[in-house]
Amino acid sequence: MKLTIKLFDSELPAPEYKTEKAAALDLYARVTTVIHPGEVKLVPLNIALQLPKDHWVLMAARSSLFKKGVMMANGIGVGDEDFCGDNDEYHAALLNFTQQPVTIERGDRIVQMIVMPRERVELEVVTQLSGKDRGGFGSTGKK
């Protein structure tokens, strides 16, 4: 699959797989950003994309992001195929969960991106489902 990408700062690396078997591409912070306790800041990720037809982007925190004292405020990020303009830079919404300011440095790898195929679903609304009830949310393995 070929992905068309624009870098806003050509001095930073393009997204890349860090190992041969990596599932996601690492994305870099474009600017140094200070996030105060309890604050959410948008950190620009230095990319705009033109995705292949019927594809979308899933952005997730790198597994080490919590060590910096921040997490993705919205859990994950979704990039739609039609978010593809010349100035449509991807951002990560980061929440500082510590009691101290956290600095994300320019060039820090903070999130990872997976490009996935998109298939639209057709909804069939019913009044009752045919499956057996499992016992409610969080009930797996409980007796």
Image (cartoon, helix red, strand yellow):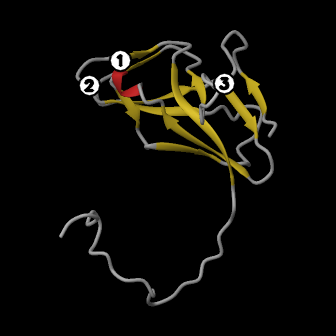
Q: Is residue 10 found left or right of 18 in the rendered image?
A: right
| Image quarter of the C terminus | bottom left
Give the Cα separation between the discs numbered 3 and 1.
Answer: 23 Å
Q: Earlier in the sequence, mark 3 or mark 1?
A: 3
User: Viewer-proximal residue, 83 or 115?
Assistant: 115
Q: Residues within 10 Å of mark 3 (few under 14, many from 20)?
A: some
Residue sitting at x 60%, y 22%: 18
Question: Is 107 situated above or below 38?
Answer: above
Q: What element carries label 3?
A: loop
Which residue carries the number 3 mark? 15
Q: Is residue 4 found left or right of 118 in the rendered image?
A: right
Name the residue type under label 2: Thr
Residue 121, position in %: x, y? 65, 70
Q: What element carries label 1?
A: strand
Residue sitting at x 50%, y 38%: 60
Q: Which of marks 3 and 2 is nearer the N terminus?
A: 3
